[in-house]
Image (tube, helix red, strand yellow):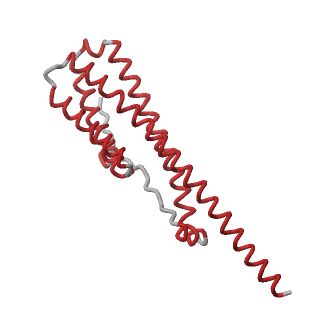
Amino acid sequence: MLPYIIGGIVGLIVLYIIFTYNRLITYKNRAEEAWSDIDVQLKRRHDLIPNLVDTVQGYADHEKQVFQQVTEARSKAMQAKEEGDPEKVQEAENQLQSTLKSLFAVSEDYPDLKASENFKELQRELTDTENKIQAARRFYNRNARALNTKIQKFPANMIANMFGFDERKFFEAEEEERQNVDVSF
């Protein structure tokens, strides 16, 4: 009788390990899928930027410093994306977003540019892409949270450690984005 009890307990432990491992794989794959969604939207942004820069440059030829900053930030963002480190990607993309704001600020000084249908369409596309990036980041953060929670909870953490599951870092807002916006009339 005792061998059956021990066999049953061992069988339950094995089933628990299999179940937990499979759940961890599910969470890991969801986080990777979410990261891929971010990657797709970032590529879309990177593809739109040269067209936007060319359009603005045609109207504002003497704003070379802004164009150079946007181009450099785009290159850094693409390089960080290739490295695949979420922290570096986040930092580079935040830098790129900041330089894009400078580019749009330059466009404010050129009424003909603001009236250009090509510029308006590129601006709409970029705004749409930014919204999709934010949604993809939220989706990634939810999946990273689920994976991290599963990895941290006992007794699943023992299985996660045994099979080498790593926690994911979250995308977070930069400090300047957390500042209150001062609206005055």
184 and 2: which one is in front?
2
Q: Position of residue 59 (x, y in %)?
A: 21, 16
Q: Please tell me in which quadrant of the rendered image residue 52 appears.
A: top left
Left or right placement of residue 160 versus residue 84 in this view? right
Question: Which corner quadrant holds the C terminus?
Answer: top left
Q: Position of residue 101 (x, y in %)?
A: 28, 32
The image shows residue 153, relative to residue 35, as above or below, that is below
Residue at point 48% right, 43% down? Answer: 36
Q: Position of residue 55 (x, y in %)?
A: 27, 18
80 and 137: which one is in front?
80
Residue at point 32% right, 34% down? Answer: 183
Q: Position of residue 178 (x, y in %)?
A: 35, 47
Q: Residue furthest left?
A: 62
183 and 154: which one is in front?
154
Left or right placement of residue 2 versus residue 184 in this view? right
Left or right placement of residue 6 versus residue 151 in this view? right
Question: Which corner quadrant holds the N terminus?
Answer: bottom right
Residue at point 24% right, 27% down? Answer: 105
